[in-house]
Image: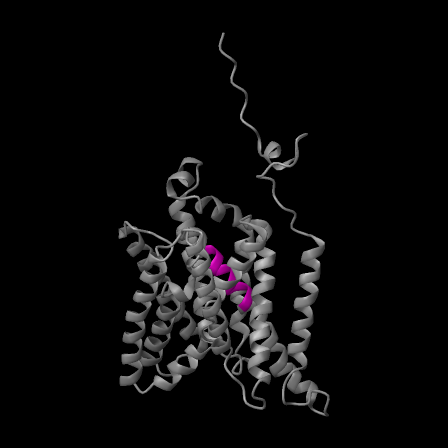
Amino acid sequence: MPDTPSAAPSREDLATPDAHGPRETRRQRLLTPALLIAALITSGLLVLSLTTGQYDVFSADGFWMFGITRVPRTIALVLAGASMAMCGLIMQLLTQNRFVEPTTTGTTEWAGLGLILVLWLFPGASMLARMGGAVTMAFIGTVIFFLFLQRVTLKSSLIVPIIGIMLGAVVSSFTTYIALMTDHLQTLGIWFAGSFTRVVEGRYELMFLVLGVSILVFVTADQFTVAGLGKDMATNVGLNYTAVLFMGTAMVAVATGVTATVVGTLPFLGLVVPNIVSLFRGDDLRSNLPWVALLGIATVTVCDLIGRTIRAPFEIPVGLVLGLVGAVVFVGLLLRQRKKGGLPA
């Protein structure tokens, strides 16, 4: 007589340990002592950022200067670091590739094209108008990248970012040509340098838009986790894969466009941070998000502090320091993947 099939396990059954030990699919706790320690360390770095600089904030007019320069700069560090790190995590899930983030998919180059086009067509455009152009072109560029990706049959770990880098190079050359013909080449160089020197009161407020993106990532984390299983699997469990892909693309475009307008390019941030967190904590998206946000903030803050102190009173753009660190980590990840057999020799 055939056995009666047992009922499928519920989410509670999968999330709780049994008599033989904890199940592998159990969620990790969000709030842990290690996370609190990481938050304290990150807070200490932010305090150090507030007190680092050539201007004496303890002088007679120091509090005024503190309010219009140091505080906006530190807020921008927090928002840019957290949002761009999360954007890298989103893109890695949607493409199922650990080497993908806005600077390896051409998204930042498309945002730069949007900035130049707005500045060319509307020379007196406001920061909000420039941001609108950057976000729009970043969204269009990310959609084009995904369309290219759908046409590629070989989707190895290395092919996907190569496609994005090649596409970004083409867009960047076109942007440089427009900037050269319209005498905006220096402006383009400043944008792509990635620096917080221009972040002062009256110029950083647009960065609060990326706070909404960060909150939305936390709210929709489970949907991105399911989408990361692939289109067929996500559709089988009832997820609207196209809608999630569209939402993720829009979120990445907003964060990249706003950051490019206010700060500039922060290369490899979305690549380095999620991979380091995943290396130590696995791939539980929801429990990893606070770690990704904190490590993103800490990474940008440390690179900014290095740039502000290594040649004081001059300042090295944070994008240069971050690009150097990110390139080393990127090569290290490639070598590690090759040892595991994920890349061709």
Q: Main secondary structure of the magenta part?
A: helix
From this viewpoint, is residue 226 visible?
Answer: yes
Q: State the residue at coordinates (41%, 56%).
A: 338
**Residue 334's quadrant in the figure?**
bottom left
* Magenta-colored span: 81-90
Q: Is residue 56 above or below residue 8?
A: below
- Quarter of the picture holding the C terminus: bottom left
From this viewpoint, is residue 213 visible?
Answer: no
Residue lying farthest top?
1
Q: State the residue at coordinates (41%, 54%).
A: 97
Q: Is residue 41 above or below residue 180?
A: above
Compare residues 339 and 21 and report the one nearer the observer. 339
Q: Is residue 279 above or below residue 76?
A: above
Q: Position of residue 260 (x, y in %)?
A: 44, 73
State how many labels appear: 0
Q: State the residue at coordinates (43%, 49%).
A: 244
Q: Is residue 43 above or below residue 1?
A: below
Q: Is residue 196 left or right of residue 229?
A: right
Q: Position of residue 146 (x, y in %)?
A: 33, 55
Q: Position of residue 166 (x, y in %)?
A: 30, 66
Q: Position of residue 304 (x, y in %)?
A: 56, 77
Q: How is the image coloured?
A: one colour
Q: Is residue 71 highlighted in magenta? A: no
Q: Is residue 130 left or right of residue 298?
A: left
**Residue 12's quadrant in the figure?**
top right
Q: Is residue 88 highlighted in magenta? A: yes
Compare residues 37 and 256 and report the one nearer the observer. 37
Q: State the residue at coordinates (34%, 84%).
A: 185
